[in-house]
Image (spheres, rainbow, N blue to C red):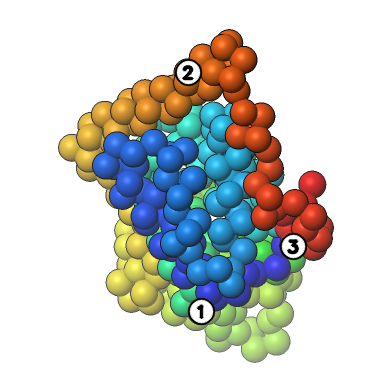
Amino acid sequence: MPMLDREEYIEQLYFFQTLRERIKASIATQEVLERIDQEILSTTKLPMAIQFLATEIKQSGLLSTGFKLLSHYFTPFQAFIIKSTEDENRKFSIDTGLNVLEKMAKYNADSPSPSGLFVFQFEILSRNKLGYDEGVTAMANDPLYSQSWKEFILFVSKQIGLVEFAEFVYLRSEYYLEVERRQDPSYEPPLQPLFASKEGQIAKANLGRDPFFLFAALQRQLNYPEVPRSTEKETAKDEITVVRQRVNDLEIRLKLIEAEVKGNVDLAFFAKPEILQNLRKDDGFAD
């Protein structure tokens, strides 16, 4: 999938922010999705995507299912983040997950760079202990990355634990090339640099140190996007919010079951929204 238009990311930012705030206010995800599409700019594809999410969550009870199916609109990494919030074995709340997607949408709307997005996404995986195998694979399929970046990201996933993160950045930077050419002016690297000279200098200064120091330095010095953090107090509140959210969603699903038992269930409730029917496949919403 190609990068979306800037207006799509601006509306995504509003969507993720508003969804997060309303879930915190103990409004069921399903209820939010059924209404919020009316607030989104109609010239974007996001209202159709939201209607699709609303339909899928009725059927599966999971928000991540819709994100995964809409692979022509939402990126694999966005789908991975939402899926991670639904994994009970990970302490990764829906509040934090939506906050991450909100910050990522904001960054994508403001002239993003592959290096900035890479460091941002990698820190998300590291800080929240989301695992590297599935997470890094999802990263590599982001439309902002060229083929060279995808190959580099997949290489990093295989070397995690053997090579420190700062070394990856330093060795693939223009600064490393500058250092080598001081000794040998004819030196040509086997792979072209992906990071600028300044990133390489900062990475070299952080060799042998905690990678979070490198993340923080890049944010201070080069305005790289900052990853949202959860304090212990916020995490406790989030767990209460998740419980309330699940109770609300269960109540809605129980009403559907009761209606089905009584023979009063409206099958249109599960139908694909009318606006999503008869769409061209290149729109990214057709079956």
Mark whose residue sits in front, 1 or 2 = 2
Q: Is residue 238 above or below residue 16?
A: above
Q: Secondary structure at mark 2?
A: helix
The crowding category of the residue bearing disc 1, from other C-alpha atoms within 10 Å (few below 14, some 14 to 19, many at least 20), is few
Between 197 and 147, the residue placed more toward the observer is 147
Q: Which mark is residue 111?
A: 1
Q: Secondary structure at mark 1?
A: loop
Q: Residue at x 53, y 38 (%)?
A: 63
From this viewpoint, is residue 137 visible? Answer: no
Residue beneath disc 3: 283
The CA span between labels 2 and 3 is: 34 Å
Query: In the picture provided, is 73 more to the left or to the right than 94?
Result: right
Q: Secondary structure at mark 3?
A: helix
Q: Position of residue 47 (x, y in %)?
A: 56, 59
The crowding category of the residue bearing disc 3, from other C-alpha atoms within 10 Å (few below 14, some 14 to 19, many at least 20), is few
Furthest toward the bottom, the residue is 185
Residue beneath disc 2: 254
